Amino acid sequence: MFYELAAPSWGQEEIDALQAVIASGRYTMGERVAAMEAAFAAYHGKKYGVMVNSGSSANLISVAAMAYHSKRPLARGDEVIVPAISWSTTYHPLQQYGLKCRFVDVELETLNMDVSKLEQALSPKTKALLAVSILGNPARLDEMRAFCDRHGLWFMEDNCESMDAVLPSGRKAGTLGDLNTFSFFFSHHISTMEGGMVLTDDLELFHLLKCMRAHGWTRDLPADSPLYERAGSDHFEAYRFLFPGYNVRPLEMEAAVGLEQLKKLPAMTAARRRNLALFQKLFAGDPNFVIQKEHGQSSSFCFTLILNPARDLDRERIFAALKAADIGFRIITGGCFLRHDTIKYYDYDIVGGAVPNADLAHDRGFFVGNHPHDLAPQIEQLRRVLDAAVRG
C-alpha cells in the first residue's frame, strides 16, 4: 500500500534480542521482563512498573487493583467519569467490575475530554476519573489531577495511544495518574508484538498489580508485602492465592524487544513530530477539515481529520478517493463508544444528556497513519487527493 495505517519499527537489534531469548531457553516472564519494567518506569520518572501481555490487560489489572485496595476500594455501583471517545478496553473492565460510567463529551479540536464538564459530572457516588489522551495528544491531565485531588478520587490514565507525549508543564503523559497504562501493540509508539505496562508510585497498588497479573498468587510478592502475612508451611505458601486474579503475564521475548525499542523511542517520537509538522503546515486553516489541536507536545500516533460540519462534504466520496489512491484510513480510535452495540450491557449515563462532539468525530471523522520515518511523499499526496475529493 502506498500509505499504510501502520508500519514496522524493528531493526536488527530487535531480531538479535529475540534470538538471545531463544538461545537462553527461558521464554516465560523472567529477568528481561524485570529489566523492561525498571527501564520503562525510570524513563517516565515513576517508582514501579508492571509489564503485562497487552494494554487492555494493563487496564484490567489497574481496575482490579483499585477494587481490592485496602483503604479506598472501588465497589459495585460506584461511578467513574470517562470520555466518550476511546478504545473498547478502556471501558470494559469498569463494566466487568460493576461500575457505572459517566460519559463526558470531548473537545472537537483536541478530541480529549472536555474538562469544563468535570464538576457537572461529579456525584456523591463518583470514585474515579479515567483520563485518555487520544492518539498522541495529551489531555488536560494537570487539571484532571487537581480535580481528583480536590474530591478524593482515584485518577487513572489510559495512555495506550500517547506514549512520549509531553504536557505544557513538561511532564510526560502517563505519569500523573495513581495508575497509568501503556500499550506496546504493533502499531503503537514502541512495539513488542503484544504487550503493555502499568506505572504507579503506590507500593500497595504495585503489589496488587503483580498479584493480579499472575493468578492472584503470592509468587511474585516479597515476604514483607502489605497485602498479606505469611502463615503456615512453605508447602502452602508457595501456592497461596490472595485475590481473584488473571494470567496476563508477558513473555521474555516481548521484554527483550521492548528494551531495544525503548532506546529508540526519543528518535522515533522526533520523526513522528517532523511528520506532524508537515501535516499541520498543509492542513492548518483549511476550512474543510478540523485537525487535532495540540495540548503540549503530541507524540502523534496518527493524523486525524474531521469534515467541517458547516460545509456540505460527502465523507463516502472522500473515502472512495482515499481507497483509489491506496491510502489507508480508519475510524478515530474506537469512535464514540456510546454508538456501539456493547453499550447495552453497561450501567451508564451521559453528562449533559448528549455528546455532540463525539458524535461528529464518529460520523464525520477518520485518521491516516503516522510512522517513525519520513512520510513527506505520503502526506503531500494525501493533501492532493483530499483537495481533489473536496472539489468533487
Image: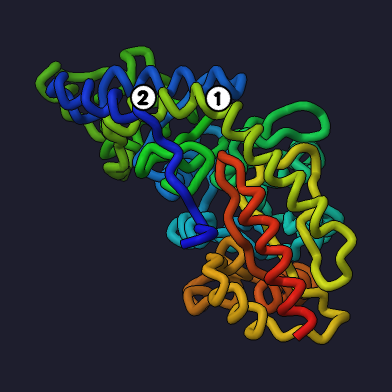
Toward which corner of the image does residue 10 lie, by quadrant? Answer: top left
Q: Which amino acid does the dot numbered 1 rest on?
A: Asp
First-in-chain label (2 vs 1): 2
Specify the label residue 202 is tagged with. Answer: 1
Residue 106: x %, y % from top left: 75, 62
Horizontally, residue 140 falls left or right of residue 337, namely right
Mark 1 secondary-structure assignment: loop
Of residue 164 and residue 209, the one placed in the foreground of this image is: 164
Residue at 67% over, 36% down? 165
Mark 2 secondary-structure assignment: helix
Residue 45: x %, y % from top left: 61, 19
Of residue 190 and residue 344, the one placed in the foreground of this image is: 190
Residue 44: x %, y % from top left: 60, 24
Residue at 18% over, 22% down? 237
Is residue 37 shown to the viewer in this render? yes
Scheme of image coloration: rainbow
Specify the label residue 13 is tagged with. Answer: 2
Residue 160 sits above or below residue 180 on the image: below
How busy is the neighbourhood of tag 2: few (under 14 within 10 Å), some, or many (20 plus)? some
Residue 135 sits above or below residue 314 on the image: above
Residue 97 sits above or below residue 235 on the image: below
Is residue 130 shown to the viewer in this render? no
Residue at 48% over, 74% down? 342
Horizontally, residue 346 falls left or right of residue 130, namely left
Residue 312: x %, y % from top left: 82, 86
Residue 282 sits above or below residue 365 on the image: above
Of residue 46 and residue 252, the one placed in the foreground of this image is: 252
How many numbered discs?
A: 2
